[in-house]
Amino acid sequence: MRNISVIAALLGAVNLAIVGCAGRSSHQPGESPIPGTGRQVVLEALEPPELQSQAARKGVLSTILSSIDPSRLFRGSGEAPKRVETDAADLEQFELQLSDGTVVGGLLDTWDEPTEQPLPLWIASFGLLPDRWGSESAKAFDLYRTQEGMPSHMLVLDHPTSGAFYGNNAMLSIGSYDDARMWIEVAEYFKEEMNVSRVHLVGISMSGQTVVHALIEDTRRGLGLFASGVAISIAPDFHQAPGAQFSRLETRAGIENPWPPPAVESPAGGPADDSDDTAFLHRLQSEAIWTFMTERFIPSYQAVRLGGPTLTIERPDVPVFLHAGMEARVTFLRENMPENWNPAFSVDNLEAFMATTRTAAVIDQVTTPLVLLSARDDPAVSRHLFEEVADRAADDPWVLAYQTPHGGHFGFDVAYGPGYLDRILDLMGDPHVVHSWTGPVADIALR
């Protein structure tokens, strides 16, 4: 799970992450807030080694270099996406209709060697617009299959803003609490059908919101499904990012952009004329969104709707299309409100849902081992967003919010080597670590 596709990484707006952390819970190397616990073991592993290259001193470069993989760039425009290019024949296309009629999909890799005990399941997703077919998914399976950790199953889910989700449901979800409810139902399915022992969650960028909400909702409902969560380069506020990028997209003459500007602006997310660098970044972000729509979203939609009419989206219609798709989802949720819906989250309209599901407003409710990992030099959005989340989590012993000096947007492998994230994920999947998160460690096996 080390990389992200080159265009998206170039323009953090598409898989938006958060830059840096200066809050009280953003621990720096050498701090030992809870010595002798599983949490402390993970904290020590989060301390980054020396930089691997001088290029990694620039967050934009480490982000780009981490994503360049010519063998797994975007599929051809208008073509049905191919399976990910990693032992594809062994991967199972997953599809499940949830209790409210929502259809979710992804790719499943099951452990094929016999074991005496039930195995854990990893659920992973990669943020705004990515789906099962992209380079992010392929590299996730690469990491999973080469990892020398404990046997487990892996499920990569389409993000609910992906073309596949839209093809199945004719609406789009911004994720967060809505997506978390979907993940819970998926986990319940696997608990029953495959008798998995426990479930671990990994969310990159926008999917980091889903991890946080899923852990909280799991506890609120007393389900006991999830053992740990990892949110890497989390984007904790949809209104400010990617909403800020959507609000700057050009629309047709006479049609107002429906995305409201964010409440707080910053150099990374501010007006396009702040500086030459900022203006250039905004142009790149606009190109990234358009490239994702043409090279990922539409082909993924067509792959789901085989034989159906071709989806046509022209560039000036993108912000209107995305807003309408997400408004449709909020309307659906309002009209199909389940009895167990958390009343803290409003479905009065899209803006209300975005405002009430902000990560900073809920992070202190987490009572499951959770790692939030971000880089100080992530070029995507304002640093204050991660700082706000970390500060709100400062008194929660279950949340470990950590900032590295370098790593850009999910470019930690360039900055600190490919083993850095591998080790974090391995530890967060270790039952000795998570079971001793706030208590003494007896026999953690450090691999």
Image (cartoon, rainbow, N blue to C red):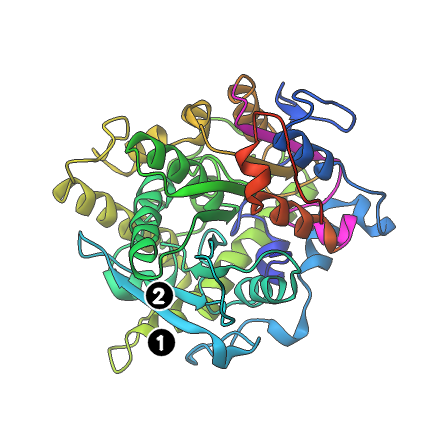
Task: Name the one closer to the observer, 111 or 287.
Answer: 111
Q: Are marks 2 and 1 in contact (CB under 8 Å)?
A: yes
User: Residue 346, position in %: x, y?
Assistant: 25, 31
What secondary structure is found at the residue carrying circle 1? helix
Q: Earlier in the sequence, mark 2 or mark 1?
A: 2
**Which residue shows up at 65% across the image and 21% down it?**
34
**Which residue shows up at 66% across the image and 40% down it?**
444
Stretch in magenta: 396-417
Q: Is residue 41 left or right of residue 130?
A: right
Q: Is residue 54 left or right of residue 259?
A: right
Mark 2 neighbour class, 10 Å CA radius: few under 14, some 14 to 19, many 20 or more: many
Residue 18 visible from this viewpoint: no
Q: Is residue 316 above or below residue 308?
A: above
Residue 405 highlighted magenta (yes or no): yes
Residue under pointer 1: 303
User: What amino acid is found at the position of numbered circle 1 in the picture?
Assistant: Ala
Residue under pointer 2: 164
Q: CA distance from mark 2 to mark 1?
A: 8 Å
